[in-house]
Image (spheres, rainbow, N blue to C red):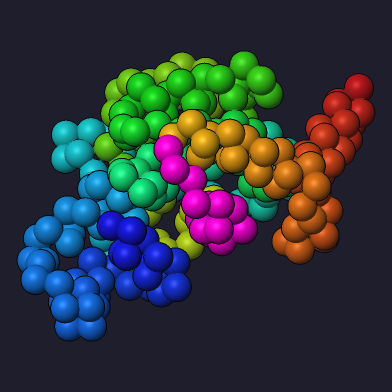
Amino acid sequence: MRLMDAHYYEHPYKGAPRMYVWLKQDKGYEISLNRVERLYYKVMGLRAISPGPHTSKRHKDHTVYPYLLRGVSITHSQQVWATDITYMPLPKGFMYLTAVIDLYSRFVLHWSLSNTMEAEWCTDLIREAIALHGCPEILNTDQGAQYTSDVFSQYVLSRGIKLSMDGKGRATDNAFIERLWRTVKYENSRFKDYQNGTTMFLGLEKFMTFYNTIRRHSSIGNKRPKEVYEQSEKTLITSLK
């Protein structure tokens, strides 16, 4: 999984079939396609950036909500949030990282680290983010079972939030939060060599603060996410008075 994770971030356009070919023919591993698919999609939570199988497999009995962002102009903070999960390797295992960001400002509103991908965990993240920042108008997710579950979807809808889900085969729907994962891995975890979940949590805590308050982002005019988020909030409040 460590090899796959490193190779994926150099070649994010590869899905499980091409990852299987690389492992078998280039690296010499005697491994089946079924095993690669299970690790790639279900355990590691990866997906190719080109259209293809999604990170988290849909649950066939769960309700999938429509994609609401097509043609929408994102003009202020608290208009659209997005959330996702990524795989974080450790020397003797792995953790999962989830976060929710404000799409207008790229501000990381809240994040959490866990050794399992449960719907309750994802729900707690949104519940805590709302307690800190209030409710957005729209929350965008992929079609993974954690997000289509009643536990997650009903909580979001009960707060008056519109739930939007990436359309099948749409490679760029969650691009902003995918970019966050690349930043976290390339600028932090790749060279920190975290040894366990505790050191990873402490390191990510510092990095997320840096990401929000110090690191400048070219996609928002070389400003910092927190300042863009807070300025937009002030402007919106002033306009409503």
Taking the spot 71% from the left edge, 38% from the top edge, the residue there is 209
Instruction: Indicate whether 59 appears above or below 217.
Output: above
Q: Is residue 193 magenta?
A: yes
Number of dots carrying numbers:
0
Taking the spot 80% from the left edge, 47% from the top edge, the residue there is 214
The furthest residue to the bottom: 25
Instruction: Indicate whether 212 appears above or below 109.
Output: below
- What stretch of residues is rendered in magenta? 178-196
Quadrant where the image shows the C terminus: top right
Quadrant where the image shows the N terminus: bottom left
Q: Is residue 49 visible?
A: no
Taking the spot 61% from the left edge, 58% from the top edge, the residue there is 187
Query: Would you say the magenta stretch is mainly helix, strand or loop?
Result: helix
Location of residue 38 in the rendering, given as x and y in whole percent from the top left corner: 17, 53
Q: Is residue 119 visible?
A: yes
Location of residue 93 in the rendering, given as x and y in whole percent from the top left corner: 31, 44
Please state if 227 lies on the left or on the right of 113 as rendered: right
Q: Quadrant of residue 71?
A: bottom right
Pick whichever, 52 or 14, lies toward us: 14
Please state if 200 lies on the left or on the right of 196 as rendered: right
Q: Is residue 45 magenta?
A: no
Q: Quadrant of residue 168?
A: bottom left
Pick whichever, 177 or 192, lies toward us: 192
Instruction: Indicate whether 84 appears above or below 167.
Output: above
Taking the spot 21% from the left edge, 54% from the top edge, the residue there is 39
